Every structure is written in structure tokens, then in C-alpha cells.
């Protein structure tokens, strides 16, 4: 028997080795074929004569900037023939970050990168030079920094008593596991309009598990978020399931994402001659009559700032489009209508209009194939949450957090106070976090999901609180003495708060037809790129979603045949599946 078993194991080992060799051969063949296609495409593009063709990109966020880069790099489109319209005075869209030592610094959102799943993001930024080291790419700079500053959270969840919880177990009951498995196996089309709470209605215990608190706050899900989007996150990020308690999969950037990626991309585009029209809002599109979908004009509203009495502040204009021109529109923005407060001032109570969503709504009202923006932008009470960026003199504040968590700045990922009324979370990045940040100042960022609830210590809704009140609430959840809190508050430069009424809009329950295709059926010169277009299998609320949408738009409109980096199917890899199953059983 032993001899037979030995022969069987030997045969199995040989078969496994042969399988590995065969896979490598197939991978090499695929890469050779992809290289051949790229060479052919480059030759074709080099021989194209664009004449006076123009590209008009609406919105100055990552999607439009990435689209411009793909036009220049892969289509050999003249940069001087590309115009990006941005309604504000800063580029980057939701990837903003700025401030100064006098007024403090702010990031409206905190954006998570991941080395394994941002396939097109890394591919694009591997060709964008770093601002600090021009001989290195942005991708190389970020990944080198991340490998030197690995994440390993030691205080992922904290309870109401200020105790760091043991989260090695996900805390599932058998019924939770079965419901989760059933969701993974369910066709997405059967999840139209369903919320996460709808799906787990027979097992409410799921929402008390360590897994739910960690997954929810990592991706900003709510119980009323889309079950379909939750399912996508599980499939797309399945390899994170096995390490969600440490967040080891989070890729850290040298500075905030605006300084680390957006500014180098902007410089690349400016060097190529791209035109940026800031403070210029596209208020409407004019479509040609008849079948198909062809944009023939853009209606512009330029803000020239404060003017002398009798002079117009706003200038209205029309940009006519010619045959061969293209238009790519940002359809909706997560930070539409965002409002800021500060240390002593709460966020204004008046709601601001959703500028990007309004443009999308006007277009969709004329062409049903452009999706249903109403589904995503009509329930601010479901889609809003708040962030806060704290700027301090010295490092006393960060030392207090480090003493509590056991994580030095840049190593802890996210810490969540799971029992807090506002469901507060925070992250302390490596310092400095902003390009303009002085050496004697430090910053950290936090957010709350339940902003209408009354605080545990500050008896007001987070929505109505000043930055000082939000920081006091946060510090009391660390369970440090009032004397130490008073000393820490003396070091505070500012706490800039940000109310974002549409930040969770991509997670709203919807039908599969509510998201438009990147290039709608019948389109001749029009595409859309944002967190609200349909990209099968991809996860919204990510940098990759914007870049993949932009690449899809450009390649389709310009007839590029080079393959786009596919969604890596980690949810089909046995090693990943087994690791996730093992974690789920703990």
C-alpha cells in the first residue's frame, strides 16, 4: 500500500508541476500576443492624421484626466486638441487635498488603493513621471513607499469601553455564513433594488459580527446600501477577506492621493499641451436629432469671480462640435454638493446643488439609454456622511493615538469605534501627508457614517457639530483623561469638517439598467466615465473604477484594439477561496 501511495503522490506531483509549466507557457503566449497587438496599434496610431479634431472632457476629476492621458499616450492624439472643463478652481474631483499651515489641511475623502486590484490604475501611472523623482513613475514611487511602510492594524475595532477587540474571529453564526455564501452564488440581476438589510433579514446577527463592522467601515457600506454592490465587493476583494482585520492589503501613498497622483498627472497633461478651463461649468448638451447619439454642442458658464458693480460675473458660451470631435462626460460625482466647516463653525445647513448630477439628468431626460441619475441622487439621508481632517502643532496628538493603538503613523490603516453613535473611524497616515505641510505640524483624518445620530458625549448630531466638538467626541472614545484632552486641544490648528451628501450615492440600491454603459448604444461621439457608469464585475468607490471607465471610453470612441487590463478573478483562485473560507469559519 505504501508503494502504491508513493507512486500516486509522485504522479500527482508530476502532474501539478506539468500544470504549472503549461500555465506559464500559456501566459507567455498571451503576453507575446498582447505585445504584438500593442505594436500594431502603435503603428496604426502613429500614422493617424487627426487634423483639427478636438476632444472635450467634462469634469476635472481622475476620470477625465485619465481619459486625456490615454488619448495622448495610446491614441497619439495632440494634447493641444484636448480641453478639460472643471466647474471649481482645482482639479482632481473627489481626489482633493490641500490647505496651509495657518488654516489647516483637508482631504474630503480618504481613498484606498490596492496593489492587486487597481490593474488599470497602476498601468496608467507606470507611464506618469513622479514630480519628486522624474526618472521614476508615479506607480513605482507609490509601491516603493508602500513596501517600505506596510500596514498592519493593531486596533481595528474598539468597543464602548475603549478596549481594543480581538478580531481574529469574524464572529459568524452558521446562518450568517449560509446567507453570505448564497449571496455570492446569486446572479446579480436577481438583486435589483435589494438592500444588504433585505438580504440578511432572516439573520440580523450578521450586522453584529466583527466582519460586518470591519467590511462596512473599510468600504463605507450602510445596511441600506445595495446588496448587488456588496456582492461585488466580496467577489472583487475576496483576497482581502482573509486579512480584513489587519488591512494589510491597503496600499499607502507617500502623500495624500491628490499630491501623490493627481498633481503628477496634471503636470504630464500640461506638458502635453492640454487645455484646462477651471471655473467653467458645462450646463447642458445639445444632441443632434434623429437616430443614434451625437453631441453637437456644449453650453458653458464661466465664473470670472467677483466683478465691479455693473459687470457680469458669469459669461455664457456655446462650444460647437464638428464631425470627428468627441465628448466624454463625468456622469455624477460623489462629492457633488460637499460643504466645509472648521474648528469653531459647523457645516452650513443649506444644501448645495449636485452640479454634475444635474447635467447627467438633463442628458438622461432626452435619451433613456443614459441611465437613471434619480436613483442615485435623490436620498441624501441615505447617501451622506462626514469626514474631518485634524491639523496640529507638534506630534502630541499623534503620539496619544499611537499609545492607544500600538501603531506608528502610516502603519495602522483604519481604527473604528464600533459602538460609537456616529460610527467613528480614523486613520493616521505617515507624516507629512500634504506637500505644503510644515515639519512641525501633523495631520490625521476621520469620518462618521451615522451623522444624524446624537453623539455619545457631545449631545448633538454630527451634522450640526463644529470641528472642535467632533474632535472632542473622538478623543473621549480613546478614554483618556479630561486633563490630557485639554492639553491635546491646545495643539490643534484646525479641524476642517466636510459634509458630503452624495458620497455613498454609488452604493444606492438600483436596477442593473440604471447605470448607463460607458459608450451608450448608438453613440457616435459621446461617452461617460464616472463611478456611476456600468463596468461589469468592477467595484465602485475606487480609483480603479474611474480609470477603467476612462480607458473604456477612449478605446471605444477611438477604435483602439489593445486589450484593457481585465478584472483579475481572485474569487476563482483556489488559494484565495480556501483562505477566505478558513477565515469565515473562525
Image: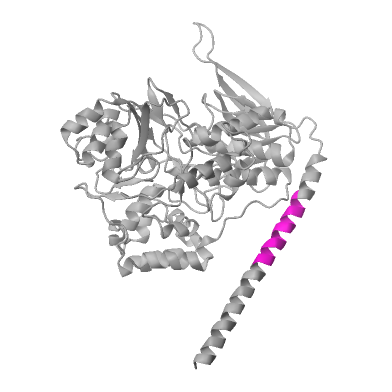
Q: Is 390 left or right of 484, judged from the image as shown?
A: right
| Residue in the foreground of this view, choosing between 506 and 145 | 145
- Residue 333 position, x and y percent, is 49, 37
- Residue 326 position, x and y percent, is 69, 36
| Residue in the foreground of this view, choosing between 370 and 483 | 483
| Residue in the foreground of this view, choosing between 207 and 237 | 237
Place residue 82 in its image quadrant: top right
Q: Is 91 left or right of 493, judged from the image as shown?
A: right
Residue sitting at the far bottom: 1
Residue at the image point whose x is 71% and y is 42% from the top: 74
Q: Where is 94 relative to 197, above or below?
A: above
Residue 292 belongs to the span the image colors magenta: no
- Residue 454 position, x and y percent, is 22, 39
Residue sitting at the far top: 309
Residue at the image point whose x is 81% and y is 45% from the top: 43
> Mostly what secondary structure, the magenta segment?
helix
Q: Where is 510 relative to 45, above or below?
A: below
Residue at the image point whose x is 56% and y is 87% from the top: 7
State which region is magenta: 24-38
Asked whether residue 4 appears in the rendered view, the answer is yes
Q: Where is 486 relative to 230, above or below?
A: above
Place residue 278 in its image quadrant: top right
Q: Is 216 left or right of 56, judged from the image as shown?
A: left
Asked whether residue 288 appears in the rendered view, the answer is no
**Placement of the C terminus among the 4 image quadrants:** bottom left
Colour convention of the picture: one colour
Count every numbered label the image shows and give the total. 0
Q: Is 553 left or right of 407, judged from the image as shown?
A: right
Residue at the image point whose x is 32% and y is 28% from the top: 394
- Residue 340 position, x and y percent, is 38, 28
Amino acid at each position: 500500500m505504501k508503494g502504491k501511495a508513493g507512486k500516486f503522490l509522485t504522479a500527482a506531483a508530476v502532474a501539478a508541476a506539468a500544470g504549472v509549466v503549461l500555465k506559464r507557457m500559456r501566459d507567455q503566449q498571451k503576453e507575446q500576443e498582447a505585445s504584438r497587438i500593442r505594436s500594431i496599434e502603435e503603428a496604426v496610431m502613429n500614422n493617424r492624421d487627426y487634423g483639427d479634431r478636438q476632444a472635450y472632457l467634462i469634469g476635472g476629476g481622475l476620470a477625465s484626466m485619465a481619459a486625456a492621458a490615454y488619448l495622448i499616450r495610446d491614441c497619439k492624439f495632440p494634447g493641444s486638441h484636448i480641453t478639460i472643463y472643471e466647474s471649481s478652481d482645482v482639479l482632481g474631483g473627489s481626489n482633493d487635498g490641500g490647505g496651509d499651515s495657518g488654516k489647516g489641511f483637508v482631504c474630503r475623502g480618504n481613498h484606498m488603493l490596492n496593489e492587486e486590484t487597481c490593474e488599470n490604475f497602476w498601468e496608467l501611472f507606470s507611464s506618469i513621471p513622479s514630480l519628486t523623482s522624474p526618472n521614476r513613475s508615479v506607480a513605482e514611487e507609490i509601491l516603493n513607499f508602500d513596501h517600505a511602510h506596510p500596514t498592519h492594524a493593531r486596533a481595528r475595532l474598539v468597543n464602548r469601553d475603549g478596549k481594543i477587540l480581538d478580531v481574529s474571529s469574524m464572529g459568524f453564526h452558521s446562518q450568517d455564513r449560509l446567507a453570505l455564501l448564497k449571496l455570492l452564488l446569486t446572479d446579480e440581476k436577481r438583486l435589483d433594488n435589494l438592500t444588504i438589510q433585505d438580504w440578511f433579514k432572516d439573520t440580523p446577527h450578521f450586522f453584529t459580527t466583527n466582519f460586518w463592522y470591519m467590511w462596512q467601515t473599510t468600504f463605507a457600506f450602510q445596511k441600506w446600501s445595495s446588496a448587488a454592490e456588496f456582492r461585488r465587493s466580496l467577489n472583487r476583494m475576496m483576497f482581502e477577506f482573509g486579512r480584513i482585520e489587519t488591512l494589510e492589503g491597503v496600499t499607502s501613498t507617500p502623500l495624500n492621493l491628490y499630491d501623490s497622483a493627481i498633481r503628477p498627472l496634471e503636470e504630464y497633461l500640461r506638458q502635453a499641451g492640454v487645455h484646462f478651463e477651471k471655473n467653467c461649468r458645462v450646463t447642458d448638451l445639445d444632441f443632434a436629432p434623429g437616430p443614434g447619439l451625437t453631441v453637437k454642442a456644449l453650453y458653458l458658464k464661466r465664473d470670472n469671480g467677483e466683478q465691479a458693480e455693473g459687470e457680469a460675473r458669469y459669461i455664457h458660451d456655446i462650444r460647437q462640435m464638428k464631425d470627428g470631435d468627441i465628448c466624454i462626460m463625468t456622469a455624477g460625482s460623489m462629492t457633488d454638493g460637499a460643504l466645509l466647516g472648521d474648528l469653531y463653525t459647523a457645516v452650513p445647513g443649506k444644501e448645495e446643488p449636485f452640479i454634475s448630477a444635474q447635467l447627467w439628468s438633463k442628458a438622461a431626460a432626452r435619451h433613456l439609454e443614459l441611465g437613471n441619475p434619480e436613483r442615485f441622487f435623490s436620498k441624501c439621508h441615505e447617501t451622506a456622511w462626514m469626514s474631518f481632517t485634524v491639523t496640529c502643532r507638534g506630534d502630541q496628538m499623534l503620539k496619544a493615538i499611537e499609545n492607544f493603538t500600538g501603531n506608528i503613523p502610516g502603519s495602522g490603516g483604519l481604527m473604528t469605534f464600533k459602538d460609537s453613535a456616529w460610527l467613528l473611524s480614523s486613520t493616521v497616515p505617515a507624516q507629512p501627508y500634504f506637500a505644503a505641510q510644515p515639519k512641525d505640524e501633523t495631520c490625521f483624518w476621520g469620518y462618521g457614517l451615522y451623522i444624524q445620530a446624537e453623539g455619545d458625549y457631545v449631545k448633538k448630531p454630527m451634522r450640526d457639530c463644529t470641528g472642535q466638538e467632533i474632535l472632542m467626541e473622538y478623543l473621549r472614545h480613546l478614554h483618556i483623561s479630561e486633563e490630557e484632552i485639554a492639553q491635546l486641544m491646545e495643539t490643534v490648528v484646525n479641524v476642517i469638517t466636510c459634509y458630503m451628501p452624495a458620497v455613498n450615492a454609488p452604493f444606492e440600491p438600483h436596477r442593473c439598467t440604471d447605470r448607463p454603459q460607458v459608450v451608450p448604444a448608438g453613440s457616435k461621439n459621446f461617452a461617460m466615465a464616472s463611478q456611476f457608469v456600468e463596468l461589469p464585475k468592477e467595484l465602485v468607490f475606487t480609483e480603479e473604477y474611474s480609470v477603467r471607465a476612462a480607458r473604456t471610453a477612449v478605446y471605444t470612441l477611438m477604435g483602439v484594439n489593445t486589450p484593457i487590463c481585465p478584472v483579475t478573478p481572485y474569487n476563482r483562485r483556489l488559494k484565495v477561496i480556501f483562505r477566505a473560507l478558513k477565515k469565515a469559519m473562525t
